[in-house]
Image (cartoon, rainbow, N blue to C red):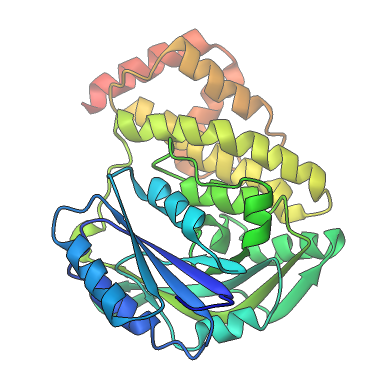
């Protein structure tokens, strides 16, 4: 194993025998002398375990952890326990880190360093997202500017993903910062925004450093099932207080302040309400509606003009203020759409 490791790249592996070799082969081409690769075999059943062991025998800087299946957050946490680098980075088992990325990002020397990514569908680049500036931000006021530069007008932009970033491991360990293993949706967002509480500096590299590979057949996802909606409720339990805490820490960040409206209410709360309106759900209860309306009441930017046209009926029902009436209407409309 290499000494004086500067970066630990953590790769969770679950049934990725057809892609993990290419991911690691490309990673080992990095023009950077001091990094290790921690492969976390998360109970794979397709031969990934043997591929990982073979990669560790080929490359000096690769080591493998074998564990029972526990999900991607569990695998990443196991990688964090094993990491020895000054920084950690997360890479998925079917994605690719672009050449010279580690050298460029490490040179920026900040508590968190963020690049950009390309979305690649069946070998075709369909989307590119990257920071606007090559810049280092230091101190509370400057970090407010970092947030304003890197949160989008309608979404979290680059901060949703835990990948294509370096994190100073000392801060992770000092704060026992880990992925929430109960979350199967939004766990990356919670990890990144949680880490923002600890940093004194951040830096951005205005380049696409990461290829996020997707197959066309995997583009469709279940975003309306009760299982998924339950995960959104669970996400909100962590995300809302986290945003409130960050708001107190970075009070002059306009974009951060706007996330409650554009992300919590307009994205997540309204998604649940739209699902209630369109299909019968076991989650459509007095208690759930009360929780959703409590989130909406805290949104001082919420009005009929601040949401997409399709959400106006949901906002009208909220403004009327009767949970019982709203439930009856959602039950009626869901029976019609069925």
Q: Residue at x 51, y 62 (%)?
A: 83
Q: Quadrant of the N terminus?
A: bottom left
Residue lying furthest bottom: 31
Q: Residue furthest top?
A: 324
Q: Residue 318 location in percent, x, y?
A: 56, 22
Residue drawn at (32%, 31%) of the image: 227
Quarter of the image that includes the C terminus: top left
Q: Determine whether 173 is above or below 277 in the image.
A: below
Name the spot of residue 145 as percent of width and height, x first: 78, 64
Pick the front one: 337 or 17: 17
Give the residue at the far left of this rendering: 46
Q: Is residue 177 above or below residue 34?
A: above
In screen coordinates, is 234 left or right of 244? Answer: left
307 or 65, which is in the foreground?
65
Query: Looking at this view, is 86 or 335 the one in front?
Result: 86
Picture quadrant where residue 60 is located: bottom left
Q: How many marks?
A: 0
Residue at 66% in and 40% down? 242
| Front position in the image: 130 or 317 | 130
Residue 247 left/right relative to 303 = right
**How far across and how far down the image is residue 225, in percent?**
29, 33
- Residue 335 horizontal/vertical position (percent): 25, 19
On screen, residue 41 above or below 225: below
Which quadrant of the figure has residue 76? Answer: bottom left
Q: Is residue 177 visible?
A: yes
Q: Residue at x 75, y 75 (%)?
A: 136
Q: Is residue 151 visible?
A: no
Left or right: 66 as drawn, with respect to 303:
left
């Amino acid at each position: 194993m290499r000494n004086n490791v500067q970066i630990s790249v953590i790769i969770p592996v679950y049934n990725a025998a057809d892609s993990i070799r290419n991911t690691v082969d490309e990673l080992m081409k990095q023009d950077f002398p001091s990094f290790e690769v921690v492969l976390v075999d998360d109970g794979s059943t397709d031969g990934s375990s043997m591929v990982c062991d073979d990669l560790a025998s080929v490359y000096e800087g690769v080591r493998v952890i074998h564990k029972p299946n526990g999900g991607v957050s569990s695998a990443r946490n196991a990688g964090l326990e094993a990491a020895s680098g000054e920084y950690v980075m997360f890479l998925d088992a079917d994605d690719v880190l672009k050449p010279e990325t580690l050298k460029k990002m490490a040179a920026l020397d900040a508590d968190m360093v963020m690049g950009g990514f390309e979305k690649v569908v069946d070998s075709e680049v369909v989307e590119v997202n990257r920071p606007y500036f090559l810049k280092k931000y230091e101190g509370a006021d400057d970090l407010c500017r970092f947030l304003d530069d890197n949160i989008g007008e309608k979404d979290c932009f680059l901060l949703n993903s835990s990948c294509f970033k370096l994190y100073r491991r000392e801060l992770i360990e000092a704060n026992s910062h880990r992925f929430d293993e109960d979350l199967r949706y939004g766990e990356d967002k919670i990890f990144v925004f949680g880490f923002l509480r600890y940093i004194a500096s951040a830096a951005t590299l205005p380049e696409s450093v990461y290829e996020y590979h997707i197959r066309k057949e995997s583009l469709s996802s279940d975003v309306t099932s009760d299982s998924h909606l339950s995960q959104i409720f669970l996400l909100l339990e962590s995300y809302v207080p986290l945003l409130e805490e960050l708001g107190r820490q970075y009070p002059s960040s306009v974009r951060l302040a706007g996330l409650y409206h554009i992300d919590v209410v307009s994205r997540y709360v309204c998604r649940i309400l739209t699902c209630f309106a369109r299909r019968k759900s076991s989650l459509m209860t007095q208690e759930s509606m009360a929780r959703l309306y409590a989130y909406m009441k805290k949104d001082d930017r919420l009005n009929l003009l601040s949401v997409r046209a399709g959400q106006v009926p949901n906002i009208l029902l909220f403004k009327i203020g009767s949970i019982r009436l709203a439930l009856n209407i959602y039950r009626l409309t869901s029976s019609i759409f069925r």
